[in-house]
Image (tube, rainbow, N blue to C red):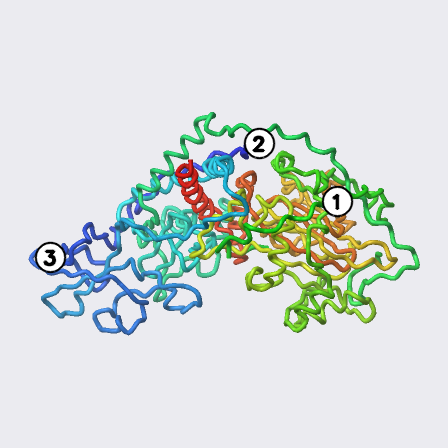
Amino acid sequence: MLAEPCIQPTPPPRVRKRPKRYEDGDEEPLLEVLRRKKSKSVSAPRSSSAAASSSPRHEESHMIMEIQSSRCYSSKYEGTEYKDVPRCISCIRRRAGDTCRFMGIRFFVHNAQTSDPERRIYTFNNEHSDEGPRFEFPTTWNIKFHETHLRRTKVAIAHSLLPVLQLALEHQTIPEGICRSPEMDVRATCDTCMTSIFSSSWMCTQCGQECCSDCFDEVRRLTNPTWSAIGRNSETNPEKLSISSKPGFLSCSRGSKHRGQNFLAVSRFRKEELLSAVEEMEDLVKVPEATKELPVNAPRPPLSPLIIPAPAPLEDNATTSQPVCFEGARESPPSPLSPLPDDNMDNDLPPQPQPQPQKPVEPAAADPATDDIPSEITQVFSDSELTEDIFREAWRQGYPLVVTDQLSKFAIGWTPEYFIEKYGEQECSIVECQTNETKQTTVGEFFKQFKTREGRTGCWKLKDWPPSMDFKAAFPELFVDFARAVPMPNYTRRDGVLNIASHFPSNTVAPDIGPKMYNAMETFETAGSNGTTRLHMDMADAVNVMLHAEPRADGSPGVAAWDLFRPEDSDAIRKFMKEKFSEVQSSDPIHVQRYYLDSTLRRELYEKCGVKSHRIYQRPGDAVFIPAGCAHQVCNLADCVKVAVDFVSPENITRCEKLTQEFRDENLVVSWKEDVLQLRTMMWHAWQSCSLQEKVLAAAR
């Protein structure tokens, strides 16, 4: 049974005045959208071509409209009548994977009674079709949906998506807007900040460049004479310089610059479907009774928090795997996102083996490098004791937690020997943890080094494996094994009923949320170390399971040392890092993923700022749950094999949104990474999918 939903308090949306088409003092718009498209003979729109002008009244009845059905540089449009028609940036650059920006939404209009090539003009679609694209939503999940699952998901989505949909409705009232269907073959993103575009955007009619509303505000500010002086004044407006100085931000086609008046508002959804969703969401948000769950059993109280003990220290005469090439190390001491469900993974799985409770691990002596650095208390649960209600109560707090006793649930031994035998000939790219050097090798050669420390010349990792191919297609037997064993499957499985990402249609470009493998050799964590995975944040929730670790040099069990920081400590960490690393003054020191807080820096962070990490020593069979927005880093103190998967829980939507905005800000400083999660699109698909499942449940009653 399921408990009362946990909804993160949603901050009030930013107040945005409904944007105007153009500011006072600007020139008149260059084009107007046709008001009628159902007949082939229409009144001529105002010309959108620099070479054309409005047609005389007596010619209006002879104006013929033709949809652009091919790319801009198709032979179909090579005639002289198209010589002054702008080509989109996608067709100009011929960028792989990008589609023509104008195809399907731009119309060419000409006079049927003349062959004058100068009479060719163009305009854009301003009506949505009665039927939108047909999304192929999943029909099966890891378990059968219960009304409580649907209610909890929809309430969480309503709190976050409602303000966005209300703005989308306002966006549709902007005159001369363009109507287009949601993309299915590509992931629509802002060409400036690389944030995914959900419903509303702005498109340049001259080059097809598309930008989000925030970036369009900057276009207007930088191209309006009354704003230009402020935009160039670093003392008056320093935060705005990053976007205006980004290379090519204002570049349009044919060497010209973007102007706000050349952009039109773009909408992707019909007004009726937006209004229907807004009405239901408003009911869920405003009426307290609507957020209540169906009767469920009361949740059990959480287990008492435990601290995972540190590994025993290495003996003085024990050798380590610290390679001699680690320049800068002053001591020798003893870790992304972007196909989702295309079918049901395995609804008819055989019963899972029941984990046997194990004797609690006795505390061991602390590692000399870390025993004097205080740590936050981390909640640790045995797999046999953890229920979904207990997990939810712990997870809603936004802090990491650990679930032990996972190994007995896996049918396959995820060992170096297994990967050498099954995938040894497969080529792969590995990265040296300290220097970021990369080299090509085979899976077999990489894992053979797990068995010996002799002859090692670095600490190498095989991360995000497979790098591009879907895990299910690359390793089908491992995919099934992981799906059967992963803890909290309703949240973490690709088809989990409480995983918001599980609703993505199979005929769209969905984010790759894993699983992915993270295999790395032993390294060190003292002064000068870069660890195994440097400090960073993830846009989604994640769970990381260790499945194998080689013994340490002294024969003690292998572990990986995690440092996970509370979200509320992020700003203090950033301030501390900017003081220590002067080269990141203009960037976010966490999001750049360049730094590892070694033992010396962590001690200083605590002494100066009072910031402690959740220090976790992950052993084989331990699953570490990492909430979205939780800065974390990893240092393998032994050769380790791990597998991780991302998910989006109803409890952490707000944190995912915050991270999306932070990543956007970082992209304005330097092109960093694309918004592959597509959180708003993901929530919209989940809302529609849950609505379909509600109808299925209602019909079955």
The reply to whether callout 3 and callout 2 are in contact (CB within 8 Å) is: no
Please give the residue where the numbered disc 1 appears in the rendered image: 356
At which x and y percent is residue 618?
A: 74, 49
The reply to whether callout 1 and callout 3 are in contact (CB within 8 Å) is: no
For marks 1 and 3 on the same chain, the one whose residue lies earlier in the sequence: 3
Q: In this view, does 345 lie to the left or right of 558?
A: left
In this view, the residue in front, 670 or 630, is: 630
Helix, strand or loop at disc 3? helix
Pair 3/2: label in front: 2
Pair 1/3: label in front: 1
Please give the residue where the numbered disc 2 appears in the rendered image: 3
Q: Distance between the residues labelled 3 and 2?
A: 65 Å
**74 is higher (above) or lower (below) than 625:** below
Q: In which quarter of the image is residue 125?
A: bottom left
Q: How far apart are marks 1 and 3 (CA)?
A: 82 Å
The amino acid beneath tag 2 is: Ala
Pair 2/1: label in front: 1
Q: How many marks?
A: 3
| Quadrant, the C terminus | top left
Measuring 14% from the left and 55% from the top, which residue is drawn there?
Answer: 42
Please give the residue where the numbered disc 3 appears in the rendered image: 60
The amino acid beneath tag 3 is: Glu
In this view, the residue in front, 256 or 471, is: 471
At which x and y percent is residue 8?
A: 55, 35
Measuring 63% from the left and 35% from the top, which residue is drawn there?
Answer: 397
**567 is higher (above) or lower (below) than 581:** above
